[in-house]
Amino acid sequence: MIMMMRMVCAVGIVLRLAGGAWGQTATSPSTQPAKANPVFASYADLVDHFTEKQQRMARELAQEHKAALEAFVARATGDDLEQACPQLIALAMELGDHAGAIAAADRFAREFASSESAVFVAGARVRALAGLGKLDEARKAWMALAESTDLTGWAPVFEAGMAVGTELVLVRQIAEARAIYEEIRNRTRQVPQIGAIIARQLDGLKWIGKTPPAIEGNDLAGKPVSFEEYKGRVVLLDFWATYCSPCITEMPNLVRLHKRFHRRGFDVIGISLDPNVSVAKSFLERNPLPWRQVADMEAAQGANATNYGVEAIPMTFLIGRDGTIVYVGAGAEELQALLGRLLGDDSR
């Protein structure tokens, strides 16, 4: 899918690792044995190892940063507080501390109602409410924010509305989710990119709670594919093609999510819409993926694409443990949050 652009400023963290022993001198060499470098079976394993290590270290640094901000905000006043509080809220949201984000947002609203950061803070508060499952309160707060914000400052409002819509979909409050999406569409008619996103969200609602159509055809190894084989697991049905640049761009992220969540019950089934199966096979030989692939031989008019109403790619259908469709159109970034909800997030 066309990834929804994240339009709220996030905290940037760049890590560099320095080699060398700590505390050694020429006259007092270290008695600790040198740590052996890990041995990797492939370059992909090496990249995964250091990507995951960097993510862990970034999270630890974010937690340390948040703790320092909390201590600072507790005693800060004036401009210092106005600048620090939104950053604390952003870090709290990043780390899943929704209650902390709400508390900081409430203080900010009391003291800096006319601040340039007020809309961002109010939007973050809505997202935090949705993250805590307080969906009625989140919907009301979002509607009030949407009505009071000019379109030029609507980026945080859009993100908050999409977050509320996602949570409503996950608890299958479809009418309420539709109302949010339609309100976003009505207020952003001058922005065609948002209109395209909302159109796909609205179209996907008709699938929520339904049993997915059976997969037609065999995988590239010649074996039939049945959802019965994945019973009790969360499955992503991923429609893609080698000619689809966004599809290829998403693949490394999807591989990382598969590796992270597979043991907890996550699988992927790829459906290639390449018109020639040899093209897909050649690509997968060069870029192996750890899940099964089915080829819809007539591309967008293939049986599976037709059965699922796929008109543009990438397109995904997320199927829950109960065997019904729980979400449609998630990209890797959104999928990570969804899998954290459905399978548990081990990073917290």
Image (cartoon, grey):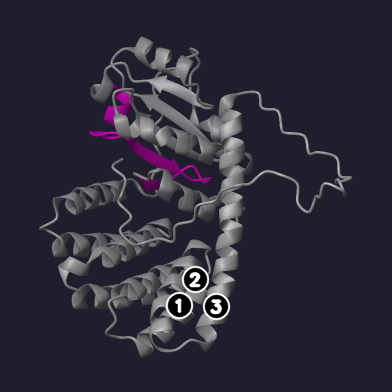
CB under 8 Å between discs 2 and 3: no
Pointer 1 or 3: first along the chain: 3
Is residue 167 left or right of 21 when viewed as pictured?
Answer: left
Query: Is residue 217 depicted above or below 21 in this figure?
Result: above
Q: CA distance from mark 1 to mark 3?
A: 13 Å
Which residue lies under the disc numbered 2?
Answer: 98
Which residue lies under the disc numbered 3?
Answer: 70
Which residue lies under the disc numbered 1?
Answer: 102
Residue name at image x 53 percent, y 53 percent: 340
Magenta stretch, residue numbers: 302-328
Is residue 20 left or right of 141 when viewed as pictured?
Answer: right
Q: CA distance from mark 2 to mark 1?
A: 6 Å
Asked if the magenta segment contains residue 311, the reply would be yes
The amino acid marked with disc number 1 is Ile
Query: Is residue 205 depicted above or below 258 in this figure?
Result: below
Residue name at image x 41 percent, y 50 percent: 334
Task: Tell me, yes or no, if residue 232 can be seen here.
Answer: no
